[in-house]
């Protein structure tokens, strides 16, 4: 049988309690302080005895405390911890602590006492507060950047998305969506390129990074919005498991870029036309005189043949005149070309891989570049010596041509390779730009470097002619590999820096 000690006094239990406890009079003056409370507040029992409880309350909370005290005294019932009775108290050494308190009224011969028990909740609240602050920061940052968050559970084929993303997709209430429903809103023209990027990111051999830009279409009014998405694939046991990422609405940015690009294209076209017109008139000017002279000499020769007084001498003189004028025309053309190409070429030591990345950025900012990119850049390629702007122009032109050619292809892929070319015993940097577009037939292959050869309705046909001239000016060569099975493969070389 269990014997219960019935003679345990209040004071024994009060002293033994692990929680900090105070006994106060109705007036709020402290009567007893247990050892746990002495330790918590840093005062001895004697020091606190007779003092008002307020001395233990942080001054800015005292008014609030008095209000609660009054409420309690009006209706002195037990109030347990966790009922929102929290107090900011002050220890002897000035440390502020947030404590949860319970109040129990004790009546001894008409006299009301209050037993106050304290429990430290600081740590829990600190963690909660830190979490709340960091969540709030994240929310504000997300809001400021207009970011939406998604979590694609690849195995279950479900996408969890936040409010911001749902708003963009026009599905404000559904917190999850199937992958197929998600993709259904993506512009049909952009689906293939995006899918290629996702598949590439899901390849366990890669780094799992995902970055894509695509349009989503509003099913009601068919309006389009541009989305920039980026994220990372997580793998489990060698398989892609989740794709977590963020999306941003970049429509305004895209529209501005498009406008700027249209203006740039227009200016460039006008400039090209002006150059073409000026070049043509300069050539005409140079050729006019010799052609007129050749015509005159030819007439003399014809006249001599048809004339009875025909002598081989007069015919010879006329034909010699023709030859001389034709040679003069040739010299004039050479001089003209030399004049047009004069001006010193400013070259610098450049990392070709960086030049390629810059050119790709220009192309994608122009609204081109909706293709899957396979970069096979040689990491330790020595620097080349060339003119930055000119080589950039060539790269941009090749990428744009490839992009335009690949538009009809389902999974457009542009492969860019850099390597060291050791043709003819000298080392040069080699760049290969290969697309999987329709390629070129034999007739086109022969003519594409000719000025003004174009198959595009709004083309000028100067791009490749200018590109070849620019690469040659920089000491390299540009050509088309006609043996490629599919698509077009352009190659160019540049000299390494000494
Ligand atoms: P433009 O782009 O103004 O037509 P270019 O000199 O850059 O001028 O190109 C000339 C022509 O070469 C193009 O019209 C096109 O027919 C062809 N071409 C260029 N690049 C490619 C390519 N990657 N694939 C297929 N055809 C191409």
Image (cartoon, grey):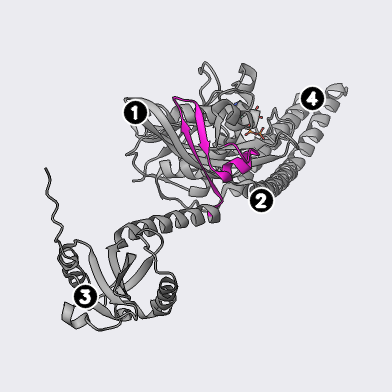
Q: Note whether 103 is above or below 256 in the view shown.
A: below
Q: Identify the image quadrant of the N terminus.
A: top left
Q: Note whether 258 is above or below 425 in the view shown.
A: below
Q: Which residue is mark 2?
A: 256
- Cα distance in 3D space between marks 4 and 1: 97 Å
Foreground mark, 4 or 1?
1
Res. 408 image quadrant: top right
Q: Which residue is mark 1?
A: 236
Is the residue under label 1 in contact with that under label 2 (CB below 8 Å)? Answer: no
Residues 447 and 414: in front is 414
- Cα distance in 3D space between marks 1 and 3: 61 Å
Residue 425 rendering spot, x and y as whole percentages: 33, 30
**Span highlighted in magenta in the image:** 145-174
Foreground mark, 4 or 3?
3
Mark 2: which secondary structure?
helix
- Check the image and name the residue furthest to the front: 109
Foreground mark, 2 or 1?
1
In the rendered image, residue 232 lying in the magenta stretch gets the answer: no
Tell me the crowding category of disc 3: few under 14, some 14 to 19, or many 20 or more residues within 10 angstroms, Cα based.
many
Res. 364 image quadrant: top right
Foreground mark, 2 or 4?
2
Foreground mark, 1 or 3?
3
Q: Which mark is residue 32?
A: 3
Mark 4: which secondary structure?
loop
Q: Which residue is mark 4?
A: 311
Residue 64 rendering spot, x and y as whole percentages: 43, 75
Question: What residue is rendered at 26% in x and 73% in y?
Answer: 23
Foreground mark, 3 or 2?
3
Looking at marks 2 and 1 on the same chain, the residue that comes earlier in the sequence is marked by 1
Mark 1: which secondary structure?
strand
Question: What residue is rendered at 44% in x and 54% in y?
Answer: 135
């Amino acid at each position: 049988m269990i014997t219960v000690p019935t003679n345990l006094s209040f004071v024994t239990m009060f002293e033994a309690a692990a929680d900090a406890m105070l006994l106060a009079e109705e007036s709020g003056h402290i009567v007893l302080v247990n050892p746990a409370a002495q330790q918590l507040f840093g005062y001895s029992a004697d020091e606190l005895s007779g003092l008002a409880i307020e001395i233990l309350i942080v001054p800015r909370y005292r008014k609030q405390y008095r209000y609660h005290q009054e409420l309690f005294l009006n209706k002195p019932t037990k109030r347990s911890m966790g009922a929102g009775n929290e107090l900011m108290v002050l220890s002897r050494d000035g440390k502020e602590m947030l404590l949860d308190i319970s109040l129990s009224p004790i009546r001894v011969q008409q006299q009301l006492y209050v037993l106050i028990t304290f429990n430290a909740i600081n740590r829990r609240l600190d963690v909660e507060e830190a979490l709340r602050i960091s969540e709030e920061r994240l929310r504000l940052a997300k809001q400021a950047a207009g970011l939406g968050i998604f979590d694609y559970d690849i195995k279950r084929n479900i996408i969890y998305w936040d409010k911001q993303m749902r708003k963009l997709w026009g599905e404000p209430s559904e917190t999850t969506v199937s992958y197929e429903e998600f993709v259904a809103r993506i512009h049909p023209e952009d689906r293939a390129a995006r899918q290629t990027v996702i598949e590439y990111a899901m390849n366990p051999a890669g780094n799992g990074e995902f970055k894509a830009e695509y349009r989503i279409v509003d099913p009601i009014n068919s309006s389009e919005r541009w989305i920039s998405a980026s994220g990372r694939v997580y793998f489990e046991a060698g398989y892609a498991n989740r794709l977590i990422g963020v999306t941003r609405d970049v429509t305004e940015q895209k529209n501005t870029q498009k406008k700027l690009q249209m203006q740039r294209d227009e200016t460039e076209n006008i400039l090209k036309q002006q150059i073409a017109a000026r070049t043509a008139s300069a050539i005409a000017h140079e050729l006019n005189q010799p052609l007129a002279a050749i015509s005159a000499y030819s007439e003399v020769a014809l006249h001599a043949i048809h004339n009875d007084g025909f002598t081989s001498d007069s015919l010879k003189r006329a034909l010699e005149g023709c030859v001389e004028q034709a040679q003069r025309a040739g010299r004039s053309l050479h001089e003209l070309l030399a004049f047009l190409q004069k001006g010193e070429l400013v070259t610098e030591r450049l990392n070709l891989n960086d030049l390629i990345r810059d050119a790709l950025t220009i192309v994608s900012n122009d609204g081109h570049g909706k293709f899957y990119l396979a970069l096979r850049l040689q990491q330790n390629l020595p620097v080349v010596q060339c003119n930055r702007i000119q080589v950039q122009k060539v790269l941009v032109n090749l990428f744009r041509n490839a992009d335009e050619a690949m538009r009809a292809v389902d999974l457009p892929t542009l492969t860019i390779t850099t390597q060291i070319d050791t043709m003819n015993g000298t080392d040069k940097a080699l760049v290969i730009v290969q697309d999987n577009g329709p390629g070129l037939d034999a007739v086109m292959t022969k003519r594409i470097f000719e000025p003004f050869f174009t198959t595009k309705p709004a083309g000028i046909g100067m791009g490749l002619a200018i590109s070849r001239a620019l690469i040659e000016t920089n000491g390299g060569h540009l050509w088309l590999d006609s043996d490629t099975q599919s698509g077009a493969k352009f190659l160019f070389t540049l000299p390494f820096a000494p």
